Amino acid sequence: MSRPPMTENIEPMYSKVITTLYPVMQRITLRDWAGAENIPREGGFVAAANHISNMDHFPLAHFLVEHGRAPHYLAKSSLFKPPGVRQILNGTGQIPVYRGTSRATSALSAATAALERGACVCVYPEGTITREPDFWPMVGKSGAARLALEGNVPLLPLAIWGTREMMWPYRDKVPKLFPRKLVHVVAGPPIDLDDLRDGPVDGQKLRVATDRLMDEITRLLEGVRHESAPQTRFDPRKQTPARGGGRDGRPTETKGDR
């Protein structure tokens, strides 16, 4: 199969990209997927995942596309600069994030518009690749929760594991695609936000929704790794990661690596 059937209308360029990359992803990864029944079949929704490697985007997109939904990522604006890449990202409806500029809020506006069109908007709520020493999710930012609450759409938690072996974070510049790596992706049920949807969205609601989201992403990842996360979530604003224990700055092997 060159590509799976989609349950939504997508951009013509996105259709071409999926047709090109889908069979490639089939060949370069081994897949352990679960929870596909939790993916909304229609309508806009926010997909929120942990972030452990620069390769996360491709298996997450593969998982979602396999089940009929094409993700529109919130991506840092620097990725949109190279010629060719810019045309592809714009042509597939990806959303640039201009951090630390007067245009920073434009990403939320663009994401909201995509949700209103019935799209899947994919967010890494940690805001960057985790710096937790053992690659557990860090403290989350509120953007995913804000989009879900203000747009009145489902907030779908996802956990990914295995992509570090394709491209080790903060070290590798080129992915290692062979031999094929086993990648785990699991989707949980949408986060229960019903008690937070009435009235204006304020800071307290965003904190509660974000905590629920990060708790569920962590729980899903614990199931994939077959081990327990630290009781206190890592906060990069208050803690300095110490990546020790292994060669090349790698942490000591965890159960999930075996």
Image (cartoon, rainbow, N blue to C red):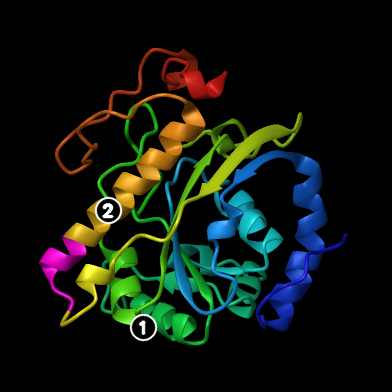
Label 2: which residue?
A: 212
| Amino acid identity at mark 1 | Ser
Q: Amino acid at mark 2?
A: Arg
Residue at image point 64% right, 79% down: 91
State the image quarter where residue 213 is shown. bottom left
Residue 245 place in picture, x, y as percent:
39, 12
130 relative to 237 in the view: left or right? right
Viewport quadrant of the C terminus = top right
Label 1 Cα neighbours within 10 Å, binned few <14 / some 14-19 / many ≥20:
few
- In the rendered view, tell whether residue 254 sits above or below residue 73: above
The disc label shown at residue 96, or none? none
Q: Which residue is mark 1?
A: 109
Judged from the image, the secondary structure of the residue bearing numbered disc 1 is helix
Label 2 neighbour load within 10 Å: few <14, some 14-19, many 20+? some
* Residue at (51, 87) in percent of width and height: 117
In this orientation, does residue 141 appear? no
State the residue at coordinates (67%, 70%).
84
